Amino acid sequence: MTYSIETSGGYVHYQECNTGSGTTEQGYVKDMVSDGQCAIVYTVLNGAGKNGPIANQAKACPKGTETQFSWYYPGYAPVQVAVYLKEV
């Protein structure tokens, strides 16, 4: 499945694929506004919520920067991998 998340200054577009043996999250994060902040996409595993331990992250800044990411989580089903976007 394909997803997009947007904040006031950041955007992430990614595809989630479950192979039966794990889950892949693949896409890009983009900084959309010249505000001195970076757009950061990150994953948290096992339903820990957005403040849980970060499994992976990718950062894009300054404005217009686009960063690609591809993360594989062996043994995890899609429901166990949550993707978040924040600005810092």
Image (spheres, rainbow, N blue to C red):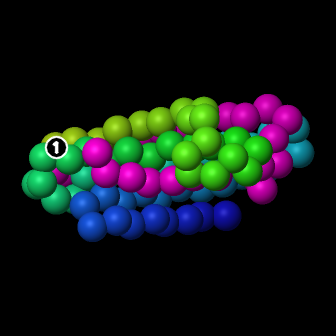
Front residue of 66/79: it is 79
Residue 31 location (% of width, % of height)? 25, 52
From the viewer's perspective, is 70 left or right of 39?
Answer: right
Q: What is the span of residues highlighted in magenta in the rendered image? A: 63-88
Residue 40 location (% of width, % of height)? 38, 45
Front residue of 14/9: it is 9
Disc 1 element: loop
Residue at left offset 39%, top offset 52%: 86
Residue at left offset 16%, top offset 59%: 33
Q: Is 67 contained in the magenta span?
A: yes
Badge 1 crowding class, 10 Å Cα cut-off, few under 14, some 14 to 19, many 20 or more, is some
Which residue position is annotated with label 1? 62
Q: Is 64 contained in the magenta span?
A: yes
What's the residue type where badge 1 is placed?
A: Pro
From the viewer's perspective, is 56 left or right of 75?
Answer: left
Within the image, what quadrant is residue 70 found in?
top right
Q: Please determine whether, in this image, residue 46 is positioned above or below residue 73.
A: below
